[in-house]
Amino acid sequence: MRRVGGLAVRITAPFAAIFALAFVAAGALIASAVVRDAEERAHYEMRFALSVAANPRVGFALTDQLLKGIRHYAVPAMSVGGMEFLALRPDGTVAAATFGDPSGDPVAAAVAERYRSGGFPELRKEAAADRPAGLSGETAAVRLFIGGETYHVLYTSRVDPAPRRTDLFLIYSDSGVRAARWRALRPFLWIGIPGVLMAMAAGAWIGGRIARPIRMLAGTARRIATGSLEERVPVAGGDEIGELAAAFNEMQDGLRRARESLVRSERLTALGMLAAAVAHEIRNPLTSIRMTVEMLDENRLGPDGAEAKRMLLDELDRLNIQLDSLLTFARRPKPVPAPANVNALVSDTLRLLARQLEHARVSVERRLSPDMPEIPLDAGQIRQVLLNLFLNAVQAMPRGGTLTVRTSVEEDRIAIEVEDTGMGIPETDREKVFSPFFTTKEAGGGLGLALARRIVEDHGGTITFDSRPGRTVFRVSLSARPAPADAGP
């Protein structure tokens, strides 16, 4: 179940909010500048229109049609709704207007009443003969509150050559100004809202791409918690997410190896206890049997009886060897390291098996490193490892073959490779090669490789193998750190 307010939201929400705020702020500033410019142009054009209407030099009589034409053509900037012209004579009567019925319109009536009561002091009341014909001065403005609405009134005077004077008023409401502002802002809103939505969608997509591999990691971690250590996280790219996935896979591999080691250790401990008990119960009777057989007089047994006695003693010796392996496996003695040369151990072990190798028609190739240093190890235990590996190789070549032994120094480690030309290890048996008591040989108890692995791991090393038909190589890797010098007295 996906949790609301997850990583993707926490990552992208601040960026989306910042982008949205920046976009809105920039849009507001631009829109404000556009509206302000439009208002200034509208005011200028309205004043210009009023000046045109007030100028008798245009050659047109001041009529309703003239004022309507000026309103229609001269003020296109903001298209302010509800804008009207009103022309009043000095006595307060209407000379011309764009109102449908000036006498019945409350706005026209309010302006006319204010005019008659002297509410426009800027307009000159002196006789027309005292002034030249034309525009009588600068345009002025006031605000009126009529019927709960605020109105703006621009006014000036027109003096005709007759001489005849007319005062002109241009009237528009606050609601018309607000409507004009909204019309100026509307294009920015149509652009800004989709822009913000697109920014949010892009942020969600980016956050999803970031959070998707992390959700995969979380899902894999939950499956690992149930015991599925074979899960892997795909490593894509070389960024931090890819490094996290690679580290997670490394941790998973470590957990799998630790579990395998723990299971193997517990299994080996149980098998060791069982082996010790079995060896103890069998060794005492075998000792008694051997002593009894040795006491038999070969002179009284005859030739056949003497041969049977020797065969019986050989079998008892073989059983004792198997019991020794069981006890060694069960006791797991700790290594007692001392400086030793691996090449010398290899040569000694091969010398010990020389007759057996000759009898099995196995030739030996030695490729030993001449620069092999002395390293701290338990020579007896490593010799046991080599003996088990050599015997395992000989048994893998029942018709003879070649046993190749290589040693090498690799930085701070040394390697021992034992190669045979036998049939190889079947694919189905490879996972069980180091398991105690597993063997495909008619003779042997299946403890040789298990014991070799335990000894190598007790030395801090590793043992691996590679096998295919006609070639199998076991590889032992040990630390090549120099043996510590003996402390002087």
Image: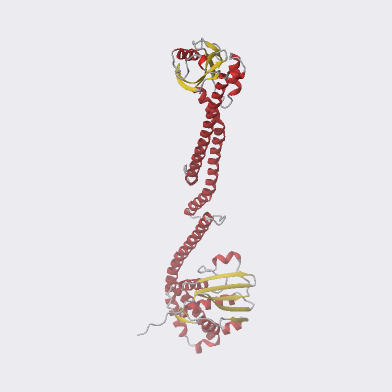
Colouring of the image: secondary structure
Name the residue at the front extreme. 130
The image position of residue 321, as x and y in percent, is: 49, 78
Is residue 1 visible to us here?
no
Q: Residue at x 62, y 17 (%)?
A: 59
In the image, residue 161 above or below residue 34: above
Q: Quadrant of residue 162?
A: top right
How many marks overall?
0
In the image, residue 264 above or below residue 347: above
- Out of 56 and 168, give the one closest to the viewer: 56
- The quarter of the picture where the C terminus appears is bottom left
- Out of 445 and 254, give the one closest to the viewer: 254
Name the residue at the left extreme. 489
- Out of 33 and 306, give the one closest to the viewer: 33
In the image, residue 80 above or below residue 311: above
Is residue 20 visible to us here?
yes
The image position of residue 325, as x and y in percent, is: 47, 75
Q: Residue at x 60, y 72 (%)?
A: 472
- Out of 239 and 97, give the one closest to the viewer: 97
The image position of residue 277, as x and y in percent, is: 42, 70
In the image, residue 367 above or below residue 181: below
Name the residue at the bottom extreme. 299
The image position of residue 120, as x and y in percent, is: 45, 18
